[in-house]
Image (tube, rainbow, N blue to C red):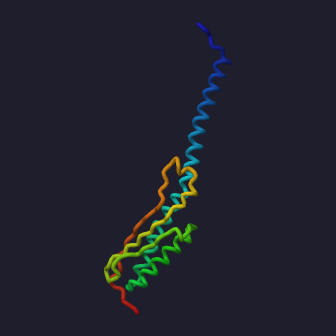
């Protein structure tokens, strides 16, 4: 039977605590790295949703299809510019019925710049983000020409 001295016991505890620290540190470094790498994708997804809402909200402000279409496109593009994204990569398409009580849907597609994601070979990154938002035209609006 071999006796373990007090100093040998302390040294084995130091080794175990160092190993636990390295494991925990590795996990937190991975978590922080994931947050920094996925934050741009979350930002783009939020911007696409906001642009779709802004487009639909602006498009339903008119009973004229031509005017409502243009208002929707301009609002969607300005929403992208306000979020700091390149509006040239976005396609804003208002569709629907501009009659009283009609439903207007705005579809926004954004082409994701894949060169901004260094780990795209490790984790799948979608090449496009798309979102649609629908709003009804107000029934009480007057048609001003």
**x and y percent of residue 18 in the render?**
63, 30
Q: Nearer the viewer, residue 28 or 8?
A: 28
Quadrant assignment for the C terminus: bottom left
Q: Residue at x 37, y 71 (%)?
A: 134
Does 98 sit left or right of 35 as displayed?
left
Number of marks present in the image shown: 0
* Residue 118 horizontal/vertical position (percent): 58, 52
For the point 59% across and 32% down, which residue is it?
A: 20
Q: Is residue 64 left or right of residue 17?
A: left
Q: Quadrant of the N terminus?
A: top right
Which residue is depicted at the point 54% across and 61% down? Answer: 113
Q: Residue furthest bottom?
A: 145
106 or 26: nearer the viewer: 106
Residue 98, compared with residue 21, is above or below; it is below
Against 127, residue 97 (above or below) is below
Question: How far across and down, in percent of the image, does residue 93 sit?
Answer: 42, 73
Query: Which residue is outermost to the right?
Result: 7
Most foreground residue, 121 or 45 = 121
Q: What is the x, y in percent for residue 124?
A: 48, 51
């Amino acid at each position: 039977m071999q006796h373990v001295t007090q100093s040998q016991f302390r040294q084995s505890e130091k080794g175990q605590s160092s190993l636990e620290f390295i494991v925990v540190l590795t996990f937190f470094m991975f978590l922080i790295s994931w947050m920094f790498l996925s934050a741009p994708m979350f930002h783009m997804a939020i911007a696409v949703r906001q642009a779709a809402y802004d487009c639909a909200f602006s498009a339903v402000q008119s009973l004229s299809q031509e005017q409502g279409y243009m208002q929707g496109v301009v609002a969607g593009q300005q929403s992208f510019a306000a979020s700091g994204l390149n509006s040239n990569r976005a396609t804003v398409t208002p569709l629907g019925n501009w009659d009283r009580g009609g439903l207007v849907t705005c579809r926004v597609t954004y082409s994701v710049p894949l060169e901004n994601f260094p780990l795209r070979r490790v984790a799948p990154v979608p090449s496009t983000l798309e979102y649609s938002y629908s709003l009804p035209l107000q029934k009480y609006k007057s048609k001003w020409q």
